Amino acid sequence: MEAWEPTEGDVAWTQGVLDTLEDGQDWMEGEMAFRKTGDKELKLLTRTERASFAIERVKIVVEGLGWTLDESEAKIIPDDPMLAAQMMQAEAESWCCPKCEEHKVVNMDLEAATWHLMGQSVYVDEDGNSVQTPRWVVEIICPCEEKVYVSPDDYLLVAGEINFYTWNVDNETLRVMTPEQITECADNETLSKINAQHLGTTYEGNTVPPHLRGTFCLIVEKSPLEEEE
């Protein structure tokens, strides 16, 4: 089979994407995710099985531009949805603290996790345009006091939906109300009387994580100092 050769357009477009990346920034392209790890250094984070040809083409282009691509630790996600879910769940349950290498993330205090914005990720839209989006990470504290950062999707795997839809911000804990809770409050006309918030893009000066925007949240916990006030 004749070797694939990139067009001038392929090279120019890829160069444009690489020029926008900062160290530690992610680039999502189709069913592949990369991270810039140094000067002209890329690391493949994940790809699907069916993206094997696509990753080879990306490698040809970036190496032609003088970059290196590290594929050694990439997660290969099966095309079968059920197998992919099983693989991701099993892998998530094996993650350990990168510092002490003793405590598993799944056994840490996941309810106390906090959400943070850390730079930008780059993905390519359907029209081939490079788009930057905020990069969210979830901070979990290991018993050894190390801060462990995971992606939102990975946090959902280890912590479950209840924790995923809970937001610890400042001295409050906000938990998304279920449709049943909202309906019950609306029927009883008690929604305005309970300690709840309808979240927009910001709350008390804090940027709201995207998956919580537009939701009704119960404030389920407050600090003793605020309760006294």
Image (cartoon, rainbow, N blue to C red):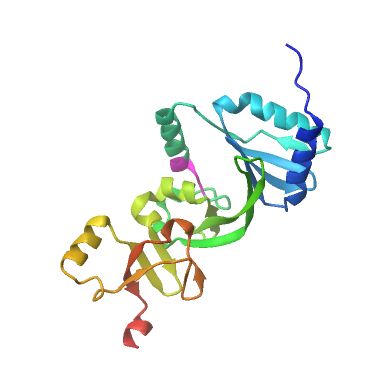
Locate residue 58 relative to residue 102 in the image: left or right: right
User: What residue do we see at 69% from left, 26% from top?
Assistant: 56
Prevailing secondary structure of the magenta residues: helix
Direction top: furthest residue:
1
Locate residue 224 relative to residue 103 in the image: left or right: left
Which quadrant of the structure image shows residue 224? bottom left
User: What residue do we see at 49% from left, 27% from top?
Assistant: 79
Residue 103 visible? no
Asked if residue 7 is among those painted magenta in the image, a careful observer would answer no
Which quadrant of the structure image shows residue 66? top right
Q: Position of residue 212 (x, y in %)?
A: 42, 59
Asked if residue 95 is among those painted magenta in the image, a careful observer would answer yes
Frontmost residue, 225 versus 1: 1
Magenta-drawn segment = 92-96
Q: Position of residue 156 (x, y in %)?
A: 42, 49
**Above or below, 6 relative to 30:** above
- Numbered label tally: 0
Q: Position of residue 20 (x, y in %)?
A: 74, 51
